[in-house]
Amino acid sequence: MTEEGQDDRRHHVPLLDPAGLLDILESNRRLTLRVIQAFPDDALFSYKPVEVLRPFGEMVQEILNIEDDYVRGIALGEWSFGKVADNARTKAELLAVCEQVRARTRELWPRITTGRLLQVEPDPFFGGPPQSHFERLVYALENEIHHRGQGYVYLRELGIEPPLFYER
């Protein structure tokens, strides 16, 4: 406890800890799931404010495909660009794929060590520069946050109050 009486455990957690990283991913996913659940069934895969944007359901498919591909690649060294979420066409199907992908992440996560996170390898998909696996997972997290923010805007445009950001 600090002098102010606040729990100060965060200062004793290693900066790069796979379990802590998974906790961050889980917290963010809980919020993303709440955004998905807030969408009307008929709008999740159809509503977009302008033609050049995608419906939120398609953005979530991308989030899930990236997670599945990156976690499998980092944990097993098997890099393939999959489309695990592309067949989901309803809210129920998308939520089921969310759970399937996250269950696979939880299953493989014990193989993701700090050393593996720090390992730098060439970009397996997009031809970008080499990067660490930690950077890949941060990219996946940033991508999810970005698209979730778009989902918030879409919900507001549909007249729906989005979930509170701080409730995870």
Image: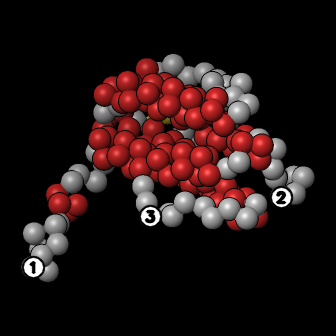
Type of amino acid under label 1: Glu
The tag earlier along the polypeptide, 3 or 1, is 1
Name the residue nearer the viewer: 31 or 82. Answer: 31
Residue at 22% of width from left, 60% of height from top? 10
Please name the residue shown 38% across and 30% down the image: 106
Left or right for 89, reference 12? right
Instruction: Tell which of 34 and 116 is nearer to you.
Output: 34
Residue type at numbered disc 2: Pro
In the image, taking residue 142 as reference, residue 10 lies left or right, namely left
Tag 3 residue: 166
Evaluate whether residue 139 shows in this view.
no
- The disc placed on residue 85 is none
User: To which residue does mark 1 refer?
Assistant: 3
Task: State which quarter of the image contains the N terminus.
Answer: bottom left
Residue 70 locus on image (x, y percent): 52, 32
Circle 3: residue type: Tyr
For numbered disc 2, what is the local secondary structure? loop
Residue that mark 2 sits on: 49
Dot 3 falls on a residue whose secondary structure is: loop
